[in-house]
Image (tube, rainbow, N blue to C red):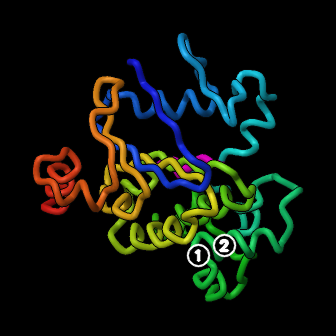
Amino acid sequence: DGFSLTIRKGEMVGLIGSSGTGKTTMVDLILRLLNPTTGKITVDEIDVSEINLERWRKGIGYVSQDIFLLSDTIANNIRFYNDEISDGDIEVAAKSANIYEFIMQQPDKFNALVGERGLKLSVGQRQRIVLARTLAKNPELLILDEATSALDNESEASIKQVLDNLKGKVTMLIIAHRLSTLVNADRLLVLDGGKIIEEGIPKILLEDKNSYFYRMYSINERE
């Protein structure tokens, strides 16, 4: 609803808001699962509708809370049918996703089997393998859509460290219910009714007891 936003290259932007405010719609528009009925989305002043769809999506890494793993090895779950991804790429991605040390502790290393739907792994380990799969593509834009909502505090801290390490290297848009994930974002947006109702640096917003972010963060911390 009159929505306008500019994201700079290498910026980490957090997006919060209650259900039905437009967060998922925004992601669907960026992924081009939906087309704008009015207005447009541009990159370097080029309308994305003019860019080849396959090329466009190749540059985007998307991670949701829904984890899908093959009943296969860790390596094949990271490569995920993409023959362009080398063993070296897999190793680098695993390190970036903060899962490399865990893999090295397994008897079969990258050839360790994850089990049906990844049942041999914790939820946090599964999510980091999925994140490694996404990073192995070397995306220019990384979108996390509630990717930390089902994680315990320790696993969330691991993902948060990954995101902090990626700051400035990859453009990131992060939708999160766990607001602690967004404290180190460059900028935070609060969406309500399809409009941006609050915007700022998270740590500064937390100093304002009247801000939406402060109120929601306080509730999250009590939970």
Residue at left offset 34%, top offset 32%: 196
**Front residue (pair 84, 45):** 45
Q: Which mark is residue 94?
A: 2
Snapshot quadrant of residue 129: bottom right
Residue at left offset 52%, top offset 37%: 6
Alpha carbon distance from label 1 to label 2: 5 Å
Q: What is the span of residues highlighted in magenta in the rendered image?
A: 61-67
Q: Secondary structure at mark 2?
A: helix
Q: Indicate whether residue 69 is drawn in magenta.
A: no
- Left or right of 78? Residue 147 is left
Q: Tell me which amino acid carries mark 2.
A: Ala
**Front residue (pair 44, 132):** 44
Where's residue 23, x and y in %? 41, 34
Quadrant housing the C terminus:
bottom left
Dot 1 or dot 2: first in sequence order is 2
Q: Indicate whether residue 65 is drawn in magenta.
A: yes
The answer, for residue 66, to whether it is visible in the render is no
The residue under label 1 is: 99
The answer, for residue 132, to whether it is visible in the render is yes
Where's residue 32, x and y in %? 64, 27
- Left or right of 27? Residue 191 is left
Count residues near mark 2 (Cα–Cα under 10 Å), then give few for <14, some for 14-19, many for 20+: many
Residue at left offset 58%, top offset 63%: 168
Count residues near mark 1 (Cα–Cα under 10 Å), then give few for <14, some for 14-19, many for 20+: many
Q: Secondary structure at mark 1?
A: loop
